[in-house]
Amino acid sequence: MNKWKVAFLLLITLVIVAIVSAVYFVTKPMAETPNPTVRELPNGSHLEVHTTPKDFENMANRLIESSMKTSKIPVKMYVGQEVTLQSTLTVFEMDLPITMTFEPIIEDGNLLLKQKTVEVGMLDIPPNTALKLLKDSVDLPSWMVIQPKEEQIYLNLTKMNVPVGEKLKGHVQAKEFNLKENRIILDVIIPTK
């Protein structure tokens, strides 16, 4: 057998192995991701903050940005009639924009984002696969828990430390998240000690 035939067969074999590996990686079964335990908030002064979706969006993006200093893949949150997350996934050295929309639900003071739609470039992939790719590709803050099997993202607000002063960290929990009426109410707890 001549060396060109051997090289061609080797190349074809490598391409097939790469495709099978990629398909396996994307379609392998997903383990269920439980909701994180809700942190008991400390005693302290409670401030009820009424805010708009745009102000919540600005605060969330600042917290995501400060939590993801080591990650080179940006994640942006937009809050309008629904919550939208935008990022970029790198697949086979190609950057694909990803846009996901969610319906927000309050659960124990935290925010549960139930996935409604997903767009990954021109690809038509299932929502749970898109969340799995995002989970595997992006190093998100510890308070953002992606649950691909459940097709949702759990924002553990009670785990976040919100700066309220030079050396003072507060805690936050959601009281109301009504995007149709442009009404978001957060309870900010400033610890006594």
Image (cartoon, rainbow, N blue to C red):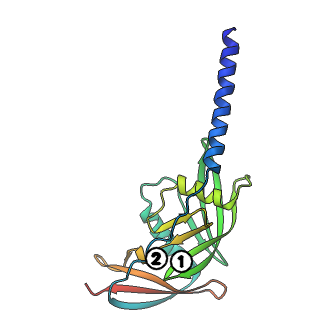
Mark 2 residue crowding within 10 angstroms, few (<14) / some (14–19) / many (20+): many
Of 80 and 89, which appears nearest the observer? Answer: 89
Mark 1 residue crowding within 10 angstroms, few (<14) / some (14–19) / many (20+): many
Amino acid type, residue under disc 1 in the picture? Leu
For the point 32% across and 89% down, the residue is 44
Q: Earlier in the sequence, mark 1 or mark 2?
A: 1
For the point 55% across and 74% down, the residue is 57
For the point 64% across and 60% down, the residue is 128
Report the residue that reaches farthest toward the top: 2
Q: Residue 154: x, y in percent? A: 53, 71
Q: Residue 103: x, y in percent? A: 64, 76
Of 133 and 179, which appears nearest the observer? Answer: 133
**Mark 1 highlights which residue?**
111
Q: Residue 64: x, y in percent? A: 47, 66
Task: State the SS at label 2.
Answer: helix
Q: Which mark is residue 162?
A: none
Q: Which mark is residue 157?
A: 2
State left or right for residue 117 relative to residue 36. Answer: right
Tags 1 and 2 touching, CB below 8 Å: yes
Q: Residue 138: x, y in percent? A: 52, 55
For the point 69% across and 62% down, the residue is 118
Q: CA distance from mark 1 to mark 2?
A: 7 Å
What is the tally of numbered marks visible in this picture? 2
Amino acid type, residue under disc 2 in the picture? Leu
